[in-house]
Image (cartoon, rainbow, N blue to C red):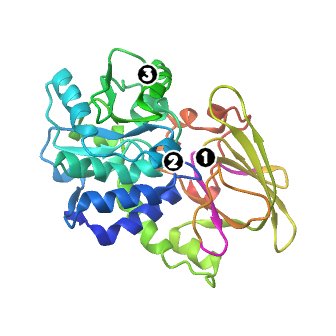
């Protein structure tokens, strides 16, 4: 892959593409895009293929916590430097670049914000290839590798360093600590050897986001959703009206719910099960598509993704099925992100055309 640079003209495409990979979650990317434009200040950030690095290590970066809190309190500058310094001190490793912890949603954009602050290139890879809600659903964790040493912090100097913990314990402790950070924090995970990125990460994910965003920009009010879907490498599950949204709130964990869409053409009912993301599509009661593939609900007029937390009855939508990262279909990792990982009692469904 030749060296490419991300500049201000690319930000809209990045925001669109990472929103699609969010599968209804990961946070709305428009605020992160505004922040990135400000961080670039007319400059450009190298986006490198992992094969272009001679060796060394890269560090996964992003934010963790409530993306609504992130939108209300955007980074002021200086969030990632002390967090990275803590990991460098702990591991005695100076990274050659950054990878995003998550290509879907806000984190796909935030990696470039961190790169502008730290003066490091971004590597075309991430640890999820889409949006997923938990730290223990990172690719490295699914492969049995540790996430720690890990640090979270903010620009005020608050810092938490964790080491020697399992991914599940790390997820639990970080979530419980986030209230002390105002709902979200900058995060840096342990350094990863460049030569192992093909195995440990989802490579090419940020280029995919940029390409998806560029193609999605062709959506207009008069666009044929089937043609746009084909250009994205996706397929249309249903075009129709949302007739019901049911939400199940609990005192702990993430909210769950269902979205029912009635098809315009034949009245078929499509039910989408969601948590932080859209996870499972059932057509007239039969499972049709599931995580780790990506379900996107788009506004019919604008083509913009409709997040799980804002979808409402009466909306005219298009639901798309976008193939998920091949990484997550590996037999040794698929259970980490399959429907049962979210409490949905069905096997992962991979359409025959993807196999």
Could you tell me how many numbered marks the image carries? 3
**Residue ID for mark 3:** 170
Position of residue 116 measured from the top left corner of the image (x, y, whole percent): 22, 52
Q: Can residue 103 be seen in this view?
A: no
Residue 204 forms part of the magenta stretch: no
Q: Residues within 10 Å of mark 1 (few under 14, many from 20)?
A: many
**Residue ID for mark 1:** 277
Q: Is residue 111 visible?
A: yes
Cα distance, mark 2 to mark 1? 8 Å
Relative vertical location of residue 10 with respect to residue 156 in this rendering, above or below = below
> 340 and 12: which one is in front?
12
**Residue ID for mark 2:** 26
CB of mark 2 within 8 Å of CB of mark 3? Answer: no
Q: What secondary structure is marked by label 1?
A: loop
Q: Residues within 10 Å of mark 2 (few under 14, many from 20)?
A: many
> 113 and 264: which one is in front?
113
Q: Where, by quadrant of the figure, is residue 138 drawn? A: top left
Cα distance, mark 3 to mark 1? 21 Å
Along the polypeptide, which appears first: circle 3 or circle 1? 3
State the residue at coordinates (51%, 55%): 28
- Residue 245 located left or right of residue 233: right
Relative vertical location of residue 222 with respect to residue 331 in this rendering, above or below = below
Give, as a single range, the part of the protein colored magenta: 287-302
CB of mark 2 within 8 Å of CB of mark 1? Answer: yes
Q: Quadrant of the N terminus?
A: bottom left
Position of residue 226 measured from the top left corner of the image (x, y, whole percent): 64, 76
Q: Main secondary structure of the magenta part?
A: strand
Position of residue 204 measured from the top left corner of the image (x, y, whole percent): 35, 55
Residue extending farthest to the right is 267
Along the polypeptide, which appears first: circle 2 or circle 3? 2
């Amino acid at each position: 892959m030749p060296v490419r640079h991300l500049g201000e003209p690319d930000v809209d495409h990045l925001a669109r593409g990472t929103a699609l990979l969010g599968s209804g979650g990961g946070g709305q990317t428009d605020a992160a895009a505004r922040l990135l434009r400000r961080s670039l200040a007319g400059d450009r950030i190298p986006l490198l293929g992992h094969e272009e690095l001679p060796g060394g290590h890269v560090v996964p970066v992003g934010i963790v916590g409530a993306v609504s809190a992130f939108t209300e309190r955007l980074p002021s500058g200086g969030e990632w430097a002390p967090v990275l310094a803590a990991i460098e001190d702990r591991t005695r490793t100076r990274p050659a670049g950054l990878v995003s912890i998550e290509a879907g949603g806000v984190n796909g954009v935030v990696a470039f914000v961190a790169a502008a602050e730290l003066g490091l290139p971004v590597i075309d890879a991430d640890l999820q290839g889409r949006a997923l809600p938990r730290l223990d659903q990172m690719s490295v964790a699914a492969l049995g590798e540790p996430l720690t040493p890990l640090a979270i912090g903010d620009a005020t100097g608050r810092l938490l360093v964790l080491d020697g913990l399992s991914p599940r314990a790390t997820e639990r402790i970080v979530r419980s600590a986030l209230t002390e950070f105002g709902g979200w924090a900058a995060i840096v995970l342990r350094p990863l050897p460049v030569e192992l990125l093909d195995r440990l990460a989802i490579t090419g994910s940020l280029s995919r986001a940029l390409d998806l965003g560029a193609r999605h920009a062709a959506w207009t009010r008069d666009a044929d959703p089937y043609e746009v879907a084909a250009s994205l490498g996706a397929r249309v599950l249903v075009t129709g009206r949302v007739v019901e949204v049911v939400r199940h709130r609990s005192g702990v964990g993430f909210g769950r719910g269902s979205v029912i869409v009635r098809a315009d053409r034949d009245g078929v009912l499509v039910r989408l099960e969601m948590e932080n993301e859209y996870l499972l599509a059932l057509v007239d009661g039969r499972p049709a598509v599931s995580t780790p593939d990506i379900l996107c609900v788009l506004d019919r007029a604008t083509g913009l993704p409709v997040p799980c937390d804002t979808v409402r009855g009466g909306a005219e939508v298009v639901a798309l099925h976008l193939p998920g990262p091949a990484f997550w279909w590996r037999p040794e990792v698929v259970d980490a992100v399959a429907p049962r990982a979210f409490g949905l009692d069905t096997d992962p469904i991979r359409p025959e055309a993807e196999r």
